[in-house]
Image (cartoon, grey):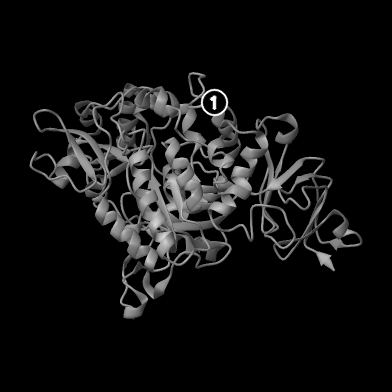
Amino acid sequence: MKLDLVVENATIHTFDGDTPRASSIGILNGRIVGLDDDLRGVTSREVIDAGGRAVFPGFIDAHCHTSWFGLSILEPSVDRCRSLDELYAALGAAIVERGGSVDDWLVVNGFDHNIVGGYPELSAVDLATGETPVFLRHNSGHLAFVNSAALRRVGAVDPRHPNPAGGEISRDGYGAPTGRVEETAQEIFQAHFRPRPLELLQRAVEVATRRYAAQGITSFTDAGIGAGWIGQSPVELAAYQRAVAAGSLAARAQVMPVLDALHGLDAHPDDGDGLGLDLGLHSGFGSDLLSLGPAKVFLDGSLLGQTAAISEPYCSHPGSGYFQDDPKELRHAMERAYAAGWSLAVHAIGDRAIDLALDCLEDLQQRGRPRTMPNRIEHASIVRPDQLSRIARAGIAVTPQASFFEHGGDAMTRSLGPRRAGWAYRVKSFLERGVVVGGSSDRPVADGDPLRGMTAYIGRLTASGQVFGDPAERVSPREALALYTTGSAAACGISASRGSLSPGKLADLVILEEDPLTTGSFDTSVTATITGGVLTHQA
């Protein structure tokens, strides 16, 4: 038998308990066929000499926003601005670059009030942008800043303009808009420049996944497509299909349709009253390259924007966040989606939102058919001690992100206070209780490089050098690597094919210049990424 590829002279960490270490790995037809002694006497069409470098299972980002990330690369961004004056100048430059057109909206990414020193003044943004309607998207995705031209386009200058359920157009004491729009209120403005063209979205996922491959990512979950303020187009999945057909998708994609993208199904009465996609498609449908994940459900907002639903008011803000719809309506929609065969990925950041998520998921799992793909709580950011055991007993997977610690950790500590900050973005507590934890970034909300993410999980350091939250939540280098390999595979329901370098699994692996399990540091680089036995990146 002649193999397609052998990687030899390597320090291979398989994350397979039966054969934890190896020095060579053989690949045929995109799958792993053997390690070390299995390969004796076997020839191969191609051989890669790893030069003693470390080899790991390909990294899996269990929660990111890929088409949005790609758009943030292709479209104007203010991510390099470090002051409000720099932000105003960047907006003005973007207007000049596009020829000063007032017909089309200017969509700008990369705004973070914590980095530039606060929220912009509407008058200053108006001075920089004139009559071109501007939608300046906050990094969290849960809010945006718009100029007066945009407010006039949608009729929101009028103080009688209603707020939608689960959102708010911010106003001053006189009823005049401030330019800040939160949560579902963003859709009022997005309706004027969405849906985005499929050709643009295809380019976005292509450029994004090339970046993924360069960072060792071989699989990812796009956590919300097709509808709501997070989606880019009702036919967003087609952009992925087009990239697959063109052979230009550089990492394996699992996509979560937003709950709003589902609709009632005209099915047999015995099938129940369900929400789904046409033809009865639901979680798990697809191939190893492109598949449907859970349905994405938004319960609350964000900690960075202080819209997450928490039990007690924020320390630096009089409110305690809010739900994105009436809780009864949210629960009813989740029940209908579950009845149609969907697993659920529930965005719940505040502890009050996590209570609602647990109440619903526990009930559905007791009454409904079991799922091959686990139900999940996305972010699970503020988890009280009493909620830890409930999550473990229910077998619910979680995806807390360490990528928020550096740039958002100090602000979140001030916002929550020391007691609740100790409950924030737990990891070790989950692992000790046997909870499935997927490594993820929430990119482009935060840095998506897995190696830097693992560093953050280990140190939990903020920009000021402080440890964010409880130091006991820090993990070891091996645990950090497991989050992005076996942990993410389990959270995404793909452990049968990915997450470890085991015979029969997909040949997805990453070669690192240095071995973090020897050096104790992730300050290294990706030498090569192999997906399905094919080089998708080579330094």
Horizontal side, residue 288 vs residue 357: left or right: right
Would you place residue 308 above or below residue 331 in this image? above
Residue positioned 41% across, 23% down in the render: 418
Quarter of the image where one finds residue 237:
bottom left
Q: Is residue 514 visible?
A: no
Three-letter code, disc 1: Pro
Question: Which residue carries the number 1 mark?
Answer: 471
Would you place residue 316 above or below residue 51 in this image? above
Front position in the image: 72 or 179: 179
Residue positioned 32% across, 26% down in the render: 89
Q: Look at the numbered disc 1 and give the secondary structure of its residue.
A: helix
Horizontal side, residue 260 vs residue 509: left or right: left
Q: Which image quarter is the C terminus in?
A: top right
**Measured from the top left, where is residue 270 in percent x and y?**
35, 79
Residue positioned 25% across, 52% down in the render: 191
Quarter of the image where one finds residue 409:
top left
Q: Is residue 161 visible?
A: yes
**Measured from the top left, where is residue 361 in percent x and y?**
40, 55
Q: Residues within 10 Å of mark 1 (few under 14, many from 20)?
A: some
Would you place residue 86 above or below residue 244 in this image? above
Horizontal side, residue 407 vs residue 20: left or right: left
Disc tally is: 1
Horizontal side, residue 265 vs residue 131: left or right: right
**Measured from the top left, where is residue 43 in percent x and y?**
87, 62
**Measured from the top left, where is residue 502 in percent x and y?**
73, 56
Would you place residue 242 above or below residue 201 in this image? below
Front position in the image: 362 or 259: 362
Q: Which image quarter is the N terminus in?
A: bottom right
Front position in the image: 64 or 502: 502
Residue positioned 64% across, 60% down in the render: 497
